[in-house]
């Protein structure tokens, strides 16, 4: 008896007991679909997290920040200079593993005023033009200030869309996109001309939702409009990372130094709030960090008043979280698959005890031990295969239901790997579940089986 | 050489510490083409004898040679293959599979001998024609009368062209007229040169066979009907001539 015939025989047997088979399959269906759906959810989360990671500049970025002097150097505290432009020059000359440097001079608590409105952006910083590529910013309108603007300390600025939304109105409110190029903006009561507008940053999910909202006719607003706090800036919910990036204002570094010096430490060497570095190779992160440290230690006369921050920790956290989510979800879904397998074994045992005479007849006309074993095993596998296929189909529905019930930032992504894995394990479970019943059936004595009533 | 040779065959069961000799030192030769009945009351060991002759079971002691091959020590797998190719069974309760139709039931032995689907169909139809059941091939066993079911079962026993056909009380579940028809069918198959062994408790049924083996308490004694044996001798005398 070949495989195809056994398969047909199995199908016929399943068809003969439709309801019973369906109930048996249900365990596998639920197991497979929850396995696929779980993996889709985790995949969606992973994708969202990775997107956010890329939005802040990826793994090659190192941030040098002024830090508290370590305890053993407390007595040198007065000589600590902080991160300064001198460090920038030194690193540029002596740290070959650093490819780009972007000094940043932040204006803490800067207040923007325009149009009679006030807004406190998340970032208001004086930077070099290189900050544009360094912090993964892209201009949508206008231009970035250049070296000449910086050299001459011109009063120009480039703003993000969240800043624009707050001061000039978001596209949703105004009805069309406001491009405030050429407008004047007061930063701490100093006038600046807006020369550029960043792109609107958002996750894939947000973009899709926004495009969908544009297609739908606008609903009439009900009730008073709610004030928008630090939240989405007109765009609802939103991944916070993206909002922070949108709520930014960039000024030329020199301008900040000259105009707002009073607000910063008054030392001859321009003190920076942070220094962003980009290294050539993530693989050589540790070497690069050591190199940067050496250079800075020499410019700081051995006072370690700086610290490094890399995205590695964040990336590591994401990976750990994803791994844990996958593991726990996998165990739960795998359990339900296992329960499905036990259901199959149970029903196969019931099935063979109802078919002892049939097995006796088959043996009498020449079915060998192997034939009977294979027949029962295939039947069990066929149930598992059918259950697995239905489960794969059901997983689509399940994912849809889950995203309806709790709409998250991250659309679940059903992967082929997950489907293959889930289907494969359902087949494996089917084989395991069939082994014992098949063994039991194959071992039946033909004489006893024929006599069985 | 006889088709089936039993030498000093015993079968011993142990039931609750008690030893039961279902067969006690039985020696027996069955020639090809013979029509034999094994007769005995229930508990006489005739079922055990049939199981051993029919390769469903192996003896505790003694040797069996079927078609020139010693089979007393065969494994269950080997026995299954022997049953499949050399032996056809007809049972008292027909033992057709209720979920399959007549044709599929008749095809069943061939499924296990690896014959292609098309050849299976052709041979099954031929076997059904032999028992005049070809027009019932699509019926389920439950849609047939007892006699028809038994004829389908005989077709199944014939389909792999076995060396020996065993019939275990083939008329036991039929009315006397239908029983006659089935016995007539066996007689016809015997006259075509097939080896048939009829197992029964009924002397009247045993009376149709030229050679009768009586079994009682696990031991056998033989009777040969002179009249029927004459026919038998005639038949066996004729067959080798035809074969040579």
Image (cartoon, rainbow, N blue to C red):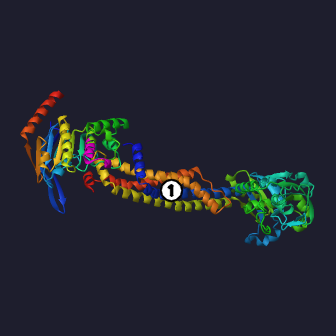
Q: Main secondary structure of the magenta part?
A: helix
Where in the figure is residue A94, as x and y percent of width and height? 78, 53
Residue at the far top: name it: B244
Q: Secondary structure at mark 1?
A: helix
Magenta stretch, residue numbers = B141-154
Check if residue B142 falls in the magenta segment. Answer: yes
Chain under callout 1: A
User: In the image, what residue occupies the spot 20% across and 37% down?
Assistant: B189
Residue A123 shows up from this direction: yes
Residue density around tag 1, few if under 14, some if 14–19, many if 20 or more, within 10 Å: many
Please tell me which residue lies in front, A22 or B9: A22
Where in the figure is residue A178, as x and y percent of width and height? 86, 56
Q: Which residue is mark 1?
A: A29
Picture quarter containing residue B22? bottom left
Quadrant of image for the N terminus of chain B: top left
Where in the figure is residue A37, as x and y percent of width and height? 58, 57
Residue B60 shows up from this direction: no
């Amino acid at each position: 008896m070949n495989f195809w015939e056994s398969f047909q025989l199995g199908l016929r047997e399943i068809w003969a007991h439709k309801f019973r088979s369906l109930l048996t399959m249900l365990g596998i269906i639920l197991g497979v679909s929850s396995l696929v759906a779980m993996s889709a959810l985790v995949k969606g989360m992973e994708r969202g997290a990775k997107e956010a990671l890329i939005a802040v500049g990826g793994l090659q970025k190192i941030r040098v920040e002024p830090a508290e002097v370590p305890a053993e150097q407390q007595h040198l505290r007065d000589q600590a200079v902080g991160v300064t432009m001198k460090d920038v020059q030194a690193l540029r000359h002596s740290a070959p593993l650093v490819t780009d440097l972007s000094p940043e001079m932040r204006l803490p608590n800067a207040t923007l005023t325009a149009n009679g409105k006030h807004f406190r952006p998340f970032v208001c910083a004086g930077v070099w033009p290189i900050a544009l590529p360094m912090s993964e910013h892209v201009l949508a309108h206008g231009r970035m200030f250049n070296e000449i603007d910086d050299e001459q300390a011109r009063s120009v600025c480039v703003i993000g869309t969240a800043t624009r939304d707050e001061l000039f109105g978001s596209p949703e409110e105004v009805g069309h996109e406001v491009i405030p190029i050429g407008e004047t903006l007061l930063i701490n009561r100093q006038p600046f001309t807006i020369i550029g507008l960043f792109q609107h940053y958002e996750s894939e999910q947000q973009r899709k939702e926004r495009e969908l909202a544009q297609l739908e006719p606008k609903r009439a607003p009900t009730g008073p409009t709610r004030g928008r706090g630090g939240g989405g800036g007109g765009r609802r919910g939103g991944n916070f990372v993206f909002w922070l990036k949108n709520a930014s204002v960039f000024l030329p570094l020199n301008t900040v130094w000259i105009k707002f010096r009073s607000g910063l430490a008054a030392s001859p060497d321009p003190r920076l709030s942070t220094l962003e570095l980009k290294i050539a190779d993530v693989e050589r992160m540790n070497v690069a960090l050591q190199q940067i440290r050496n250079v800075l230690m020499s410019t700081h006369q051995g006072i370690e008043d700086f610290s490094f921050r890399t995205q590695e920790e964040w990336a590591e956290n994401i990976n750990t979280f994803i791994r844990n989510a996958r593991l726990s979800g996998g165990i739960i879904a795998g359990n339900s698959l296992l329960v499905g397998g036990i259901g199959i074994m149970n029903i196969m045992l019931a099935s063979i005890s109802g078919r002892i005479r049939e097995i006796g007849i088959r043996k009498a006309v020449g079915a060998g031990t192997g034939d009977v074993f294979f027949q029962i095993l295939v039947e069990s596998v066929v149930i598992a295969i059918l259950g697995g296929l239905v489960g794969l189909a059901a997983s689509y529905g399940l994912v849809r239901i889950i995203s309806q019930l709790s709409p998250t930032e991250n659309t679940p992504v059903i992967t082929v790997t997950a489907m293959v894995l889930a289907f494969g394990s359902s087949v494996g479970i089917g084989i395991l579940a069939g082994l014992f019943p098949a063994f039991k059936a194959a071992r039946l004595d033909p004489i006893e089986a024929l006599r069985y009533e | 050489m006889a088709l089936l040779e039993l030498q000093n065959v015993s079968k011993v069961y142990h039931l609750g510490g008690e030893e039961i000799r279902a067969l006690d030192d039985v020696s027996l030769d069955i020639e090809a083409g013979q029509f034999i009945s094994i007769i005995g009351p229930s508990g006489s060991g005739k079922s055990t004898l049939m199981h051993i002759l029919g390769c469903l079971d192996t003896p505790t002691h003694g040797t069996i040679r079927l078609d020139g091959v010693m089979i007393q020590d065969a494994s269950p797998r080997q026995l299954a293959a022997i049953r499949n190719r050399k032996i056809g069974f007809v049972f008292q309760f027909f033992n057709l599979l209720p979920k399959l139709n007549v044709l599929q039931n008749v095809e069943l032995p061939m499924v296990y001998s690896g014959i292609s689907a098309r050849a299976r169909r052709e041979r099954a139809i031929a076997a059904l024609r032999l028992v005049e059941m070809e027009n019932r091939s699509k019926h389920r066993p439950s849609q047939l009368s007892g006699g028809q079911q038994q004829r389908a079962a005989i077709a199944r026993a014939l389909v792999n062209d076995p060396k020996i056909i065993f019939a275990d009380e083939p008329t036991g579940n039929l009315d006397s007229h239908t029983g006659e028809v089935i016995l007539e069918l066996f007689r016809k198959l015997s006259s075509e040169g097939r080896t048939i062994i009829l197992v029964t408790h009924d002397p009247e049924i045993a009376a149709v066979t030229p050679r009768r083996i009586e079994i009682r308490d696990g031991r056998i004694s033989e009777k040969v009907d002179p009249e029927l044996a004459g026919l038998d001798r005639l038949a066996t005398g004729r067959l080798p001539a035809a074969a040579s």
